[in-house]
Image: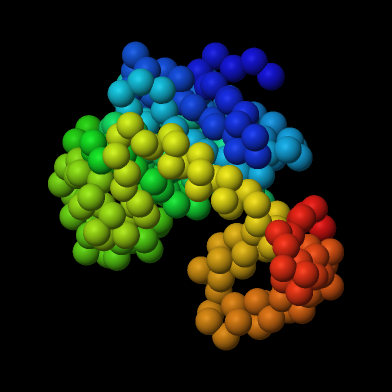
Amino acid sequence: MAFKHLLIEHRGPVAWLYLNRPQALNAISYECMRELRAAWIELRERDATRVIVVSGKGRGFCAGADLTDAPSAADLPGPQAPFLEAGAQMEAVLLALGKPVIAAINGVCCGGGLELAMMCDFMVAAESARIGDAHANFGALPGGGATIRLPRIVGVNWARYLMYTGELFPAAEMAAIGLVTRVVRDELLETEVQQLGEKIAAKSPLGLRRMKMLIGDGLDMPTELAMKMEKLVAAEHMRSQDAIEGGKAFKEKRKPEFRGC
């Protein structure tokens, strides 16, 4: 599928999905949201793709929702509902992806851009990246999960501080509170993330998919129930071809060849 606001590059088992509106710091418009949903589906169905990286073209990862698309007070609630619904549909497909998704943060990442990054499995950021919530700066409220995900990732107090102030912070500070997983030199961002993606892509696709499911579902379960679920899935996984191949490869002192089943 041809995209107007996105760019997809396939680099071996790693697919790079770029927001491609550099003139607007990759702010997400209604049409861009719809394209993101279509892109997730396309990458989900592509067997050769085992890891997905999301990044932005130009000087920023994503500056949030495109405010030029925002409805005026006289227009509410009409135009707002389709944008939020498009966001919810995009989010549902992304969260259901069984493949690891990495956010490679270059430049500005705020508002809806931060929400998109938090929907990914983790973030790797360039040293010069500036990251924050920023909704409060425009009298806006998050609609992509920031009030839920941000406290879970960084804790309630830091989430309040980020959201109430609307400030953008250096990547290193966000790494210190756990929002960013790794910080790398600007010129090495794509190289390091590609290498990381290839390392992850060499693992069992089935194992990764089940790990991702257990982590996501476990966050919303009581600990005892989550532990029972893990044991049930682990017992089933032991009978999979990937688990059997992993054991054989270990005994034979060779690299395993996983097929995802």
Q: Which residue is farthest bottom?
A: 224
Q: Nearer the viewer, residue 168 or 84?
A: 168
Residue 199 position within the rendered picture, expressed as x and y whole percent measured from the top left: 57, 51
* Relative height, residue 30 to residue 202 (above, below): above
Image-based side of 52 in relation to 158, left or right: right
Viewer can see residue 219: yes
Q: Position of residue 163 (x, y in %)?
A: 23, 49
Asked whether residue 217 is in view, the answer is: no
Rendering coords of residue 115 (x, y %): 40, 43
The residue at 65%/52% (across/down) is: 202
Say which quadrant the C terminus sits in: bottom right
In depth, the one of 154 and 194 nearer the eye is 194
Q: Hey, which quadrant is residue 231 in on the image?
A: bottom right
Q: Is residue 74 above or below residue 176?
A: above
Residue at 60 percent of width and 60 percent of height: 212
Question: Residue 80's x, y, as percent?
Answer: 44, 29
Q: Looking at the image, is 211 positioned above or below residue 38?
A: below
Q: Quadrant of the N terminus?
A: top right
Picture quadrant where residue 35 is located: top right
